[in-house]
Image (tube, grey):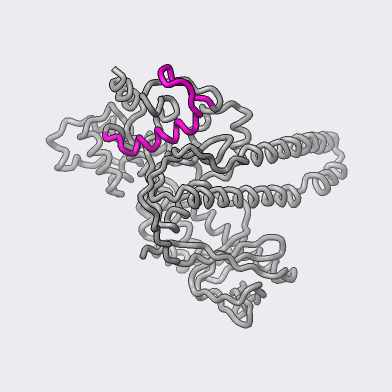
């Protein structure tokens, strides 16, 4: 039976100030190590260095470079390895996005696409292209008349588009511990401190014992231990049932069966958005007053405002409380969907909300900006893996703009989709049925360019 990863959490009781201070120092320095690695090795000139993780580590030891962080070697080595791994994953994601765009580009020949994919696969060639280093044309491409200058420029342009900012952590509240950095005894987890030979005993609320690399998270003078465990996926005994789902604004999901799940989504978003607008407006007024006092040279009044009115403790607590509530609601709605629909496969479009920018007005986008990006997709994939439900992503182009019955282009106003032939239907239900139908469409795959999709749909109508 297939195994999946589930994160188990252990909680501590309230810690004394010295222990929490020591853990905070470790977390902050751990963050600094990772930030240095991100800033030093995330660039295009470091692509070839990423395969030499041990060489970097040995160099830090040889020249005493790591001593500046005042951490036991095992901590900074773990932080270094973790950061390098994240950078490698980032480059893999960049290459994947470039490949997707290459597939969608109608102006490229098969030879052009072959060349670009070959360059992306070979790190040394990719490094040379990005750093404008000349190299001989490969034998397999010598007989093909390709515009190498244009193709190399295209690789660089797409890479710049998807590279994004250097990953950087501002809050040092987490760090990892491997099996050499902790031990369990008498209901406590004992974590290695910065003082040689001394460990910090942390009393836990349970007596479970684990033996793997885990994450320590600090908050409110307590800690959470996040432990990734492998568990068996549950067997799916349902009769074959493939459903399509569409993400909504007023509902979490609309299903091709005609049902809705997460109908309080709009209510949750509205309450928090209105609260945040009110709080932030007030804080902006206080910031302006604080800056005004500073300009007049009244530092004492400005400092009073900063200390008493512009703190982050209450602000972050309320935000965290809302996030927990909405996460709980998302999981409840997903459980309801799986329980009632009994699916063996779920067909869906990408659920990261990147295409909502042009789909909804400003007031709605402000609500969605409070969304926990990627959380729905992450939890949906986890639930599917846990219950042995297959999931398929489809090309979302025009799924909300055509009728699921006759294929005609119609008009969507609010929750209503109007087809010139089949009349009115709920817009999200219509989209979910189109998403399900798209799974069986042999002419439109996940990477078909949206212009080509429109052309195919128009030709079918003719």
Residue 110, percent from left and from top: 21, 34
Residue 84, percent from left and from top: 44, 57
Q: Quadrant of residue 200?
A: bottom right
Residue 45 visible (yes or no): no
Residue farthest to the bottom?
Answer: 186
Q: If the image is split into quadrants, where does the N terminus sit?
A: bottom left
Q: Which residues are magenta?
A: 416-442
Residue 418 visible (yes or no): yes
Classify 194 as above or below 367.
below
Decide which of 351, 184 is in the foreground and name it: 351
- As drawn, is 430 to the left or to the right of 145? right
Residue 124, percent from left and from top: 29, 49
State the count of labels: 0
Classify 87 as above or below 113.
below
Decide which of 425, 383 is in the foreground and name it: 425
Q: Is 440 colored magenta in this rendering?
A: yes
Q: Quadrant of residue 53?
A: bottom left
The residue lying at 36 percent from left, 58 percent from top is 51
The residue lying at 69 percent from left, 41 percent from top is 272
Decide which of 204, 248 is in the foreground and name it: 248
- As drawn, is 260 to the left or to the right of 93? right
Residue 191, percent from left and from top: 60, 74
Q: Is 251 colored magenta in this rendering?
A: no
- As drawn, is 379 to the left or to the right of 18? left
Classify 379 as above or below 68.
above
Classify 38 as above or below 1.
above
Decide which of 89, 430 is in the foreground and name it: 430
Residue farthest to the front?
Answer: 239
Q: If the image is split into quadrants, where does the C terminus sit?
A: top left
């Amino acid at each position: 039976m297939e195994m999946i990863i589930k994160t188990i959490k252990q909680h501590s009781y309230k810690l004394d100030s010295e222990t929490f201070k020591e853990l905070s120092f470790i977390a902050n320095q751990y963050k600094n190590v990772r930030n240095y690695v991100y800033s030093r090795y995330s660039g295009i000139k470091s692509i070839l260095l990423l395969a030499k993780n041990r060489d970097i580590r040995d160099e830090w030891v040889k020249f005493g470079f790591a001593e500046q962080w005042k951490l036991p070697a095992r901590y900074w080595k773990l932080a270094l390895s973790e950061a390098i791994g994240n950078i490698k994953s980032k480059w893999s994601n960049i290459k994947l996005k470039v490949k997707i765009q290459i597939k969608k580009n109608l102006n490229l020949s098969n030879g052009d696409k072959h060349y670009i994919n070959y360059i992306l696969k070979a790190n040394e060639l990719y490094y040379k292209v990005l750093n404008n280093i000349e190299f001989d044309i490969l034998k397999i491409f010598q007989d093909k008349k390709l515009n190498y200058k244009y193709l190399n420029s295209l690789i660089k342009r797409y890479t710049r588009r998807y590279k994004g900012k250097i990953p950087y952590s501002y809050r040092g509240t987490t760090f990892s511990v491997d099996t050499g950095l902790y031990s369990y005894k008498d209901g406590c987890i004992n974590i290695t401190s910065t003082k040689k030979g001394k460990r910090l005993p942390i009393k836990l609320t349970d007596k479970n014992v684990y033996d793997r690399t885990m994450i320590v998270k600090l908050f409110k003078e307590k800690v959470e231990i996040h432990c990734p465990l492998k568990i068996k996926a549950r067997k799916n005994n349902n009769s074959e049932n493939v459903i399509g789902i569409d993400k909504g604004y007023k509902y979490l999901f609309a299903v091709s069966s005609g049902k809705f799940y997460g109908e309080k989504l709009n209510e949750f978003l509205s309450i928090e958005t209105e609260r945040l607008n009110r709080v932030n407006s007030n804080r902006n007024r206080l910031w302006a007053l604080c800056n005004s006092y500073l300009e007049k040279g009244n530092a004492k009044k400005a400092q009073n405002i900063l200390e008493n009115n512009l703190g982050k403790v209450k602000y972050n607590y309320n935000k965290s409380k809302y996030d927990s509530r909405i996460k709980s609601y998302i999981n409840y709605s997903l459980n309801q969907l799986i329980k009632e629909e009994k699916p063996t496969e779920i067909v869906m479009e990408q659920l990261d909300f990147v295409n909502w920018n042009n789909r909804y007005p400003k007031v709605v986008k402000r609500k969605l900006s409070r969304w926990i990006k990627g959380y729905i997709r992450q939890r949906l994939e986890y639930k599917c893996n846990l219950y042995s439900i297959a999931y398929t992503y489809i090309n979302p182009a025009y799924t909300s703009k055509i009728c699921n019955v006759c294929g005609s282009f119609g008009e969507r106003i609010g929750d209503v989709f109007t087809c010139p032939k089949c009349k009115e239907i709920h817009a999200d239900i219509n989209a979910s049925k189109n998403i399900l139908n798209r799974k069986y469409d042999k002419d439109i795959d996940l990477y078909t360019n949206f212009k080509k999709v429109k052309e195919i749909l128009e030709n079918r109508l003719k």
